Amino acid sequence: MGRDERIRKAGPARHRGAEGGASRPPRSGGDDDPAESTRGSGLTTGEVARRLGVAPTTVRSWDRRYGLGPAARDDGRHRRWTTGDVARLERMCALTATGVPPAEAARLALRGADAAGPPRAEGTAPAPRADGTAPPVRRRTGGAVGRPGGGLRLGDARQECRGVARAALRLDAAALDALLSDAIDRHGLVTAWTEVIMPTLQAVGRKWEGSGERYVEVEHFLSWHVSGALRRHTPPVAADRPEGTTVLACVPGENHTLPLEVLAAALAERGLTVRMFGAALPVESLVAAVRRTGPSAVGLWAQSRTTASRPLAQHVAGIEWGVRGARRRPVVLTLGPGWSRQTVPGLPHPPGLAEAVAAVESAVRG
């Protein structure tokens, strides 16, 4: 399905705890200031919004309109959300995700009625047993987000993953963009990708594989917004530097570009010059690009073993340029799971994003 079907099974980083993501100072001001969480007890509005996968303005709106605000405030001004406060908001999210009108969802969340069972349409009630007693309430198990029975299993992933997953399931563009940008700002591109974005993408891929054609729109939606977030956080292209450039391309027949997009963004974040050629670059065009740019490093992405080509990688690694007696060759990196059983002797195969960034930096800067 082209670029939008990417990352169902693996990406440039299938590991946790990657190094190299430079942390940025948190933003300050109002309820979204992370520093506020160190004062008093409970969560700030910004922290609650990230956990739920909604915008902070949505949380405040629910407070004003429906009385779903916190029971107490720090110093009479800052909202402090307790576990019980957050539980009401989680119930509100679950109800609205199934189509219950916000006002009715708020009423049910405040009342706590049927809190553990699947929500009902307004004006209906659970059918009684034959003896006239109420049926037992079915409780949901943990680990899923989104609507009842339709969540994504994220295991012990970061709490931020759950917020991103909820926003993707609701197809909430504004909340998803805000959460992705916040994750990149807080952790840097490398850590945000390996610990927030990739686990969520993989969870969506598993959901898609296990439910036929359902949730395809969620994966397309999430992938598109991740790509947009990467572009927004990619510094302007720097002028060519003496140490050379890096060429990134998918091998012929390979359309999964998102892993290369994050690598390009991470390299640009470190001030390295990148030439990005995207999906399914023909052999002749790849060779021409390498000869024209004289790169220090070439990254070839293959998601599938059927697209990884050892002869192609060896051919690119053998390309030379420069004056006689001082001719140069590029360092070719085989990137992606497609190369796992097609490793090329002498060519690095970084297992994750952090390792790929380090390998490119080593090749470019010597």
Image (cartoon, rainbow, N blue to C red):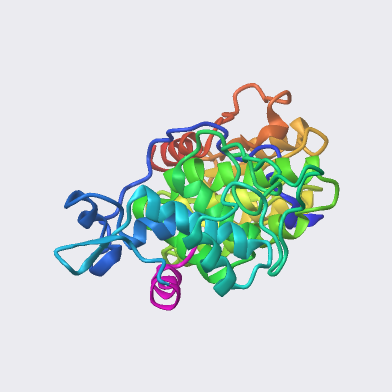
Is residue 209 rendered to the left or right of residue 12?
Answer: right
Q: Does the magenta stretch include residue 123?
A: no
Q: Nearer the viewer, residue 162 or 119?
A: 119
Name the image quarter holding the N terminus: bottom right
How many numbered circles are shown?
0
Is residue 79 rendered to the left or right of residue 247?
Answer: left
Residue at x 55%, y 62% (from the top left corner): 108
Residue at x 45%, y 67% (from the top left corner): 55
Q: Of helix, strand and loop, which mostly describes the magenta segment?
A: helix
Q: Does the magenta stretch include residue 61?
A: yes
Q: Indicate the position of residue 263 as horizontal and vertical percent values.
A: 52, 48
Please, which residue is most extreme toward the left here?
75
Whether residue 198 appears in this view of the structure is yes
Q: Indicate the position of residue 192 as horizontal and vertical percent values.
A: 45, 48
Whether residue 224 appears in this view of the structure is no
Q: Indicate the position of residue 157 as horizontal and vertical percent values.
A: 50, 38
Residue 147 position by quadrant: bottom right
Please, which residue is most extreme toward the bottom here?
65
Is residue 85 rendered to the left or right of residue 353?
Answer: left
Is residue 327 rendered to the left or right of residue 215?
Answer: left
Name the image quarter holding the C terminus: top left
Residue at x 22%, y 65% (from the top left corner): 78
The boundaries of the magenta stretch are: 53-66
Residue 136 position by quadrant: top right
Q: Indicate the position of residue 42 as horizontal and vertical percent values.
A: 28, 51
